[in-house]
Image: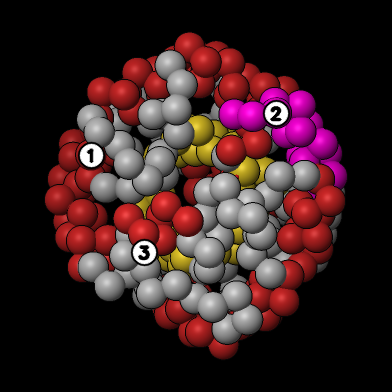
Amino acid sequence: MHVQNYIKEQLKKGTLHFALIDPERQDPKDAGRMARIAEEAGSSAIMVGGSTISSPSVVDDTIKEIKKQVDLPVIIFPSSSKCISRYADAIFFMSLLNSRNPDYLIEEQAKGSLLIKKFNIEPIPLGYIVVEPGMEVGKVGEANLIGRDDCDRAIRYALAAQYLGMSFVYLEAGSGANEAIPDEMIRSVKKHIDIPLIVGGGIKEGRTAIEKAKAGADIIVTGSILEKDKNSIFEIVNSIKGVRK
Ligand code: 1GP
């Protein structure tokens, strides 16, 4: 399966939901069960990743189990080159554009590139932009966080991602954030770019998800809620189904 084409086809139907599973937070069997719930709810892909990954084997075991239980594409959402697994269908080949540390801009990508080629994993180029509060990923990724009302700066990074040839822009508020990316920021970024916009961090209920979708998010990512309250995922996916911009 060519995952990027699959996503672009799915996007023609409206806003999509991707479920994010952190392989460090549960054993692989539970990760598989969580992925099955997401698939039943109507998610379009499973992302696997977390801000701190201690070894590639936990990523391998988690993805193997997820692949046993669901047919959805599994996309690695890497925090470093330790997060590469031969069992994934694709990897978001991402740069944390507002990081102060070259490791997250290009060095980890260079470290991982040959392995991605060897394992024949589909790379999906993505510009990752971390907005306040940023949470763990903001700290670990040494991000110069974008202020919540600094739409102008968010637009500049998003457009730079597009001009660098990236296929997606991801606006991230940080996993577990109290507030998700502001609607106004989503609206203004979306107005300026032609590539799909992914929004994640702090989306815990259908009401918020639908607001973000209506503001212009093409793909909504949720992580924590799947760990805490597996039923809310149904509410979130149902609420965004069919939202068109
Ligand atoms: C984090 O955007 C994702 O990378 C998901 O965030 O865990 O808050 O849903 P949550």
Numbered disc 2: secondary structure: loop
Do we see residue 14 in this rendering? no
Residue in the image at 50% along x and 33% along y: 21
The magenta span reads 227-240
Q: Does the residue labelled 1 lie within 8 Å of ligand 1?
A: no
CA distance for labels 1 and 2? 29 Å
Do we see residue 174 in this rendering? yes
Residue in the image at 41% along x and 54% along y: 137
Q: Does the magenta stretch include residue 230?
A: yes
Tag 3 residue? 96
Instruction: Name which of mark 1 and mark 3 comes first in the sequence.
Output: 1
Instruction: Name which of mark 1 and mark 2 comes first in the sequence.
Output: 1
Tag 1 residue? 82
* Numbered tag placed on residue 191 in the rendering: none
* Image marks 3 and 2: residues in contact by CB distance under 8 Å: no
Numbered disc 3: secondary structure: strand
CA distance for labels 3 and 2? 29 Å
Residue 202: image x %, image y %? 63, 51
Residue in the image at 34% along x and 28% along y: 59
Q: In terms of image quadrants, where is residue 213?
A: bottom right
Residue 97: image x %, image y %? 37, 70
The nearer-to-camera label among 1 and 2 is: 2
**Relative to residue 65, is residue 139 depicted above or below?**
below
Residue in the image at 59% along x and 54% along y: 177
Q: Does 169 sit left or right of 127 as displayed?
A: right
**Relative to residue 87, is residue 80 depicted above or below?**
below
Q: In terms of image quadrants, where is residue 88?
A: top left
Mark 2 residue type: Asp
Mark 1 residue type: Lys
Tag 2 residue? 229
Q: Does the residue labelled 3 lie within 8 Å of ligand 1?
A: no
Mark 3 residue type: Leu
